[in-house]
Image (spheres, helix red, strand yellow):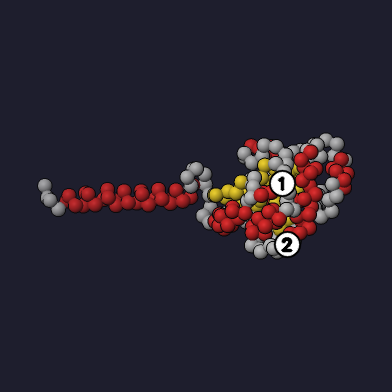
Amino acid sequence: MSNEASPRRIGFPAALIVALVAGAGVLYGIYGRAGKETAPGVCMAAAARAQEIAPLARGQVASLAVSKTPREATPIAFSGPQGEALTLAAFKGRTVLLNLWATWCVPCREEMPSLDRLQAALGGPDFEVVAVNIDTTRLERRQSFLREAGVEKLAFYANPTADVFQILKKAGKVVGLPTTLLIDPEGCEIGVMPGPADWASQDAVKLLSGALGRRPAG
């Protein structure tokens, strides 16, 4: 038997092993640690943004859980101010503070005026408070609720089937009301707040200004 054959037989498996390792690296990048498929580059900007604002989650917004590895927000659908069908994709290009509320939710009633003031302070082409009502009965109460709360700046969004709540609950984002999610312009979820907050407070405005890349006054 020729001694020259041995290097060739050894070289082939070695090359094969290298190829398999390289392939595994590609698959790791595509599917990630959790085994879920992700598109390269998606939410990379959100990860940097989340890292920047994490230290600002304090005081009145200390309960905001800022994600260390932002993912694309869970797809949901609801109706707009004119009854038009909307999804979160309609807000792409804007930072969104998505809030779920109901007329029977006492903390929601306390929180709603601060959301309205936040919209007045920061709302514009690059930011909107999207407060989605999930009442399923006695729908006539919704507008009177908003009037009594002094809401003037928030657009009216609704989901009378409460599907939004169930979808986000199944995704582990919601356990009760109110719940608020911070979503970046690319549709990536940066953080979630369980329970109410004073969204018009200096703490909240500073955090959201940071998410928008602005420098708040003071």
The extreme left residue here reads 1
x then y, percent, for residue 178: 73, 41
Q: Residues within 10 Å of mark 2 (few under 14, many from 20)?
A: few
What type is the residue that disc 2 sits on? Pro
Residue 8 appears in view: yes
Q: Is residue 193 above or below residue 122?
A: above
Image position, residue 6 (x, y; %): 17, 49
> Residue most toward the top?
137
Q: Residue at x 74, y 59 (%)?
A: 122
Residue in the foreground of this view, choosing between 122 and 185: 122
Q: Quadrant of the C terminus?
A: bottom right
Q: Is residue 73 visible?
A: no
Residue 98: percent from the left, percent from the top?
A: 71, 49
Residue tagged 1: 197
Circle 1 Cα neighbour tier, 10 Å, few/some/many (<14 / 14–19 / ≥20): many
Residue at image coords 65%, 52%: 183
Q: For the point 64% across and 41% down, which residue is it?
A: 173
Indicate which disc, 2 or 1, sits on the residue closer to the N terminus: 2
Badges 2 and 1: C-beta atoms under 8 Å apart? no
Find residue 20 and report its horizontal and vertical position in percent: 35, 48
Q: Kindly identify which residue carries mark 2.
A: 125
Q: Secondary structure at mark 2?
A: loop
How far apart are labels 2 and 1 at the CA level?
24 Å
The residue nearer to you, when weighing 156 against 192, is 192
Q: Is residue 134 left or right of residue 211?
A: right
Query: Given the image, on which type of amino acid does mark 1 rest?
Result: Ala
- Can you tell which of label 2 and label 1 is closer to the viewer? 1
Q: How many marks?
A: 2
Instruction: Say what secondary structure mark 1 lies in.
Output: loop
The vertical placement of 168 against 97, above or below, is: above
